[in-house]
Amino acid sequence: MRNRIVSASVVVLTLALPVWWIHRHTSRYDYIIGQASARNGVDFYFVKALIFEESWFRPDIRGSMGESGLMQVSMAAAADFASKRGFPPFYEARLLEPELNVEVGCWYLRQSLDRYKNSPEPMLFALLRYNAGAARADAWLRQAQSGPVPAGMSSERYYLSLVDLPKTREYARRILQRSRSHNYWF
C-alpha cells in the first residue's frame, strides 16, 4: 500500500511540474499585458496571443529584422511612440524591458486597429500590418474590398486567402484563433 502511495505521488509530481512550468511561463507577464492593453484600449487576449506568437513570452529575444522583446517591437515603432508621446528616443536595449516593450507594442497595435477600424476585419488587418507592414496590409485591404465574400465562406477565411505570404497568413490565423480560445499552452 505504501509503495502505491509513493508511486502515485511521484507520478502526480512528475505530471504537475511541467503543467506548473507552462502555466508560470505563459502567465508571468499577465499584469504588464493587462495594464498596457487597458491603457491602449486593446483586448488583453489579443495582445497575449500576439506575444505568444512573436516571442513565446521570452523578453530578451531579438528578431532577424532588428525587432526586440516580447512583442518584437522595431526601433522605428519605438521612435514613433517616443515622438508622439513626447519622450526622448529609446536605446535599443530598453526595448528588452517587458514593461516598455509591451507598452510600445500595445500602442502600435492600437494605431493599427484605428487605421483599419472601418475595414471588414479590423483585428485581422491590424495583424497583417503588424507583421508585413502598412503597404502590404493596405494592398490586401483594397483587394478584399474589391468584391463580396464568396457564399459559404467566412469573411476572415476569405480575407486570409488573399494574403499571398503564407507565413503572414498563418501568423494572423494563429493569433486570431489563440486570442479567441485563450490557449497559450501549445
Image: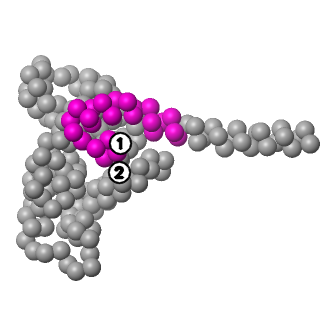
Residue shown at the point (19%, 50%) measured from the top left:
126
Q: Name the residue nearer the viewer: 109 or 164.
A: 109
Q: Is residue 128 visible?
A: no
Q: Where is residue 39 in the image (x, y as percent from the top left)?
A: 23, 32
Marks 1 and 2 in Cβ contact (< 8 Å)? yes
Residue 179: mark in rendering: 2
Q: Name the residue nearer the viewer: 162 or 111.
A: 111
**Which residues are drawn in magenta?**
22-46
Residue shown at the point (12%, 20%) measured from the top left:
87
- Residue type at numbered disc 1: Lys
Indicate the quadrant where residue 142 lies: bottom left
Residue shown at the point (13%, 30%) measured from the top left:
81
Q: Is residue 45 magenta?
A: yes
Q: Where is residue 74 in the image (x, y as percent from the top left)?
A: 20, 36
Against 51, residue 116 (above or below) is below
Main SS of residues in magenta = helix
Residue most toward the top? 88
- Residue type at numbered disc 2: Ser
- Total numbered labels placed on residues in the image: 2
Q: Mark 1 points at which residue?
A: 48
Q: Position of residue 130 (x, y in %)?
A: 20, 47
